[in-house]
Amino acid sequence: MPLHLTPEDARRYLESGEAPGPHLDLIGAMAAQAAAAGLRLGLFEALADGPVPLPGLAAALGADPAGLRVLLGALTATGYLTEGPGGYAPTAVARSLLGGYGNTLLFWQEVTAGLWGGLEESVRSGGRTADFYAWLGERPDVLARFQRLLREQAEWLGEEIVDAAPLPDGARRLLDLGGGHARYSIAYCRDRPGLRACVVDLPAALEAGRAATASAGLTGRVELLAGDVRGELPYRGQDAVLLFNLLHGFGEEEAAALVRAAVGTLRTGGIALVLERDPGHRGDAVARAFTSFFELNLHHTQGGRLHSPATVDGWLAAAGCPGTRRHVLTRSPAHVLTVATRA
């Protein structure tokens, strides 16, 4: 939360125990709800050009002035807005919501509000007590936010991945498992004019891929097939197979089986590429916290977990791809790209 504390205030909550540290978490949780409400109202867009007084802002948003004043007070107290003679204005923190992070905040606020009830039950039982994809399927707006997050991440990382792990010379066939948005397949097809890709994912996930391939002019080279990657994979002779941000949706047994099946689609000399967030990444405190909560969401809503690069190496070796090599992505140091060749 963008709640600014003086060093003395922070010490009281975080070091001395004079005040309850969890109170800051409570305020942060409420601040996320308030910021999400502001986004849905169009509040931050209405303030983008400078200060606006309350009456004008209420009229622009079609909001009750008394109710809006209370929300503005909460957002001012938590560092999203400032109040001056000219009215309310956004801070740099609020402007980051307009710069693209607003979609991320809205998505995670919706996930935590909608799915994290009963979190203790999934911890007690060891299995998920919510169904992430079924829940998404009933909420088209939230699904669109999720697909946008995946798309933007893939567009950001795709160029670096293609440079770090080029396909074998003469590669003609690429299998992309669970990559419904098709952005990684598009990146590789752009890099290799003779390459054709097949993307396999659930039907709802492929809608974004169809739009992306059409926009890229690659409809004829990127095939999108509806299917469950956990089933039998009837594909053979592939030059490369992608398992990008897929294994974390499964427990160890299922993930290992998926790696075996994926390697089984490769020709001798074909390469398997696995992209995953590293649970052991030692970035700053913010990165470590997000990775931890990301894994908690996986456990609670999918029965999944983050798998270490060493574990992935072992699965690949057992499947017939010894001698893995890793690339820690500079654009997202929490992510590790593992590359292995089928012997």
Image: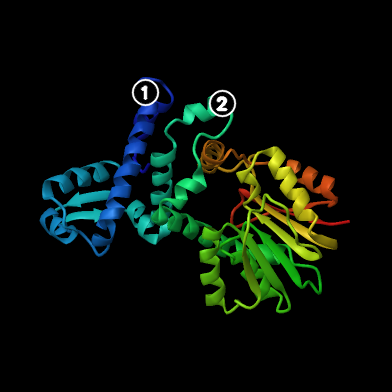
Q: Is residue 87 left or right of residue 223?
A: left
| Mark carried by residue 20 | 1
Q: Position of residue 62 (x, y in %)?
A: 16, 57
**287 with respect to 36 (left or right):** right
Given the image, on which type of amino acid does mark 2 rest? Ser
Helix, strand or loop at mark 1: loop
| Dot 2 alpha-carbon crowd within 10 angstroms: few under 14, some 14 to 19, many 20 or more | few
Separation of residues labelled 1 and 2 (CA atoms): 30 Å
Choose top left, top right, bottom left or bottom right for residue 304: top right
- Location of the N terminus by quadrant is top left
Q: Earlier in the sequence, mark 1 or mark 2?
A: 1
Tell me which residue sits at (35%, 59%) in the image.
98
Q: How is the image coloured?
A: rainbow
Residue pictured at 67% horizontal, 41% vertical: 307
Q: Position of residue 299 (x, y in %)?
A: 56, 36
- The residue at the point 66 percent across, 53 percent down is 229
Asked whether 126 or 7 is in front, the reply is 126
Residue 173: image x %, image y %?
75, 69
Q: Amino acid at mark 1?
A: Pro
Considering depth in this image, is 187 or 13 the residue closer to the camera?
187
Q: Secondary structure at mark 2?
A: helix
Residue 259, position as x, y percentages in the image: 74, 49
Is the residue 55 above or below the residue 220 in the image?
above
| Classed neighbour count for the residue bearing mark 1: other residues with Cα under 10 Å, few (<14), some (14–19), many (≥20) | few
Quick check: 74 above or below 93? above
In the displayed structure, 41 sits above or below 172; it is above
Would you identify the image quadrant in which residue 21 lies? top left
Circle 2 residue: 125
- Closer to the observer: label 1 or label 2? 2
Residue located 13% across and 59% down the image: 59
Visible in this render: residue 40? yes
Quadrant where the C terminus sits is bottom right
